[in-house]
Amino acid sequence: GQLVQSGPELRIPGTSVKVSCKASGYNFTRYYIDWLRQAPGQGLEWMGRIDPEDGDIKVAQKFQGRVTLTADTSTSTAYVELNSLRSEDMAVYSCAARGNSGAYNYWGQGTQVIVSS
């Protein structure tokens, strides 16, 4: 299986960005889709996850109220939308398919999001 993400994005502070993650080669509803990000010089940060099977969502407290996670089973595509962007949100955003064991089975290639005025 594989996950293919949308291309790089340039946004102005205060706006929003939506990144997609299209799954192929496996049953999309089999694994959670996690979203993580890595800012320059920082470690990997977990943002949240969605269960494509039933739409159940968990979001890290830091992002609650600013992040929207969705999954379209008809196209096997997951989305993360981040609102009210600020410079600190500049990072590479990645999706990953995770099983119940906690192991990541597949990773997207990452999407660079630049936030600059």
Image (cartoon, rainbow, N blue to C red):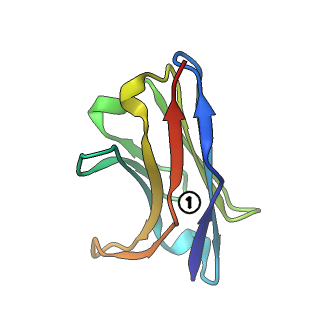
Q: Can residue 41 be seen in this view?
A: yes
The amino acid on which the numbered mark 1 sits, given as a three-letter code, is: Pro
Give the image location of residue 29, x and y in percent: 57, 69
Question: Disc 1 on helix, strand or loop?
Answer: loop
According to the image, label 1 marks what residue? 52
**Residue at the image position 65 percent from the left and 54 percent from the top:** 6
Give the position of the N terminus as an image quadrant.
Answer: bottom right
Q: Can residue 64 be seen in this view?
A: no
Give the position of the C terminus as an image quadrant.
Answer: top right
Q: In this view, does 8 lie to the left or right of 90?
A: right
Q: In this view, does 7 lie to the left or right of 58?
A: right
**Residue at the image position 56 percent from the left and 60 percent from the top:** 52
**Residue at the image position 60 percent from the left and 82 percent from the top:** 26
Q: How many residues crowd around disc 1 within 10 Å: few (fewer than 14), some, or many (20 or more)?
A: many
Q: In this view, does 77 lie to the left or right of 90?
A: right
Comparing 90 with 58, the one in front is 90
50 above or below 14? below
Q: Is residue 27 left or right of residue 112?
A: right
**Residue at the image position 43 percent from the left and 35 percent from the top:** 90
Give the image location of residue 4, x and y in percent: 62, 67
Snapshot quadrant of residue 25: bottom right
Give the image location of residue 47, x and y in percent: 36, 44
Residue, far right: 74
60 above or below 78? above
Comparing 88 with 98, the one in front is 88
Give the image location of residue 97, x and y in percent: 45, 69
